[in-house]
Image (cartoon, rainbow, N blue to C red):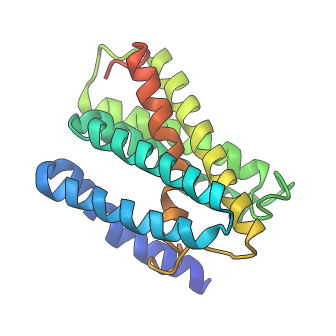
């Protein structure tokens, strides 16, 4: 319960700050991106001992954060992406804790099938509310549903990938920066994988926000 309260309090403080940086853009947003990038690189360096994995991880983080920087020029797109990933994470955590049920995989013992469904459900609900708030009539519901499902799926896979490396290293969290959550990489593990996929879909014209 103590950890749950810490997660709630940290989220109440951090989420408004994140969306404030996104809404302001420019220098504040760039500094925030750079700060998260540096901490993520440090946490990845400490997470794995394999030199090949270290270098590969650094290259991937550079690519993902650079694409995030490019996307940040459009506040609607970046908000869309962040909302899906955050809602997926929150939905997975709440549904998994409340409903419990069968475990999803040994890679991450806390992940359940209920959590997966919760991640999909809350991400779709959040995007429908987001779309309604913006009154984006040109963005059809089919795109909303498929887009939310795809990004949520990639986000959950990214979470499992980082969980795999944490399990290999026999650690629970990548850091201790965020009370109740762990490190920066613990919180953006799904997003760093979702960012390149979102950008790819944008290039091929699937997303038209």
Question: Which quadrant of the figure contains the N terminus?
Answer: bottom right
Residue 145, given in percent of the width and then of the height, sits at 52, 24
Residue that protrudes farthest toward the bottom in the picture: 2
Q: Residue at x 55, y 22 (%)?
A: 146
Specify whether 90 is left or right of 127. Answer: right
When the figure is inspected, residue 27 is found, relative to residue 110, above or below; the finding is above
Residue at point 55%, 48% (across, down): 88
Q: Position of residue 151 (x, y in %)?
A: 53, 35
In front: 145, or 147?
A: 147
Q: Position of residue 162 (x, y in %)?
A: 64, 57
Would you place residue 16 above or below residue 70 in this image? Answer: below
Q: Residue at x 23, y 50 (%)?
A: 22
- On the image, the x and y values in percent for residue 138 come to 30, 13
Is residue 83 in sight in this rendering?
no
Q: Quadrant of the C terminus?
A: top left
Q: Nearer the viewer, residue 178 or 35?
A: 35
Q: Residue furthest front?
A: 51
């Amino acid at each position: 319960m103590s950890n749950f309260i810490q997660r709630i309090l940290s989220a109440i403080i951090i989420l408004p700050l994140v969306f404030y940086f996104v809404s302001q853009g420019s220098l504040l947003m760039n500094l925030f991106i750079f700060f998260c990038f540096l901490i993520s690189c440090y946490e990845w360096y400490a997470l794995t001992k394999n030199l090949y994995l270290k270098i590969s991880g650094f290259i991937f983080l550079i690519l993902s954060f650079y694409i995030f920087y490019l996307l940040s020029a459009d506040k609607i797109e970046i908000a869309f992406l962040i909302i899906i990933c955050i809602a997926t994470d929150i939905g997975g955590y709440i549904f998994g804790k409340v409903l419990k049920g069968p475990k999803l995989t040994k890679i991450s013992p806390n992940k359940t099938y209920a959590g997966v469904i919760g991640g999909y459900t809350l991400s779709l609900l959040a995007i429908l509310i987001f779309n309604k708030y913006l009154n984006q009539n040109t963005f059809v519901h089919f795109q909303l549903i498929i887009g939310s499902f795809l990004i949520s799926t990639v986000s959950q896979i990214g979470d499992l990938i980082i969980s795999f490396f944490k399990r290999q290293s026999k650690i629970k969290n990548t850091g201790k920066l965020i009370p109740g959550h762990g490190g920066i990489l613990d919180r953006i593990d799904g997003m760093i994988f979702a960012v390149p996929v979102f950008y790819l879909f944008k290039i091929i014209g699937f997303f038209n926000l």
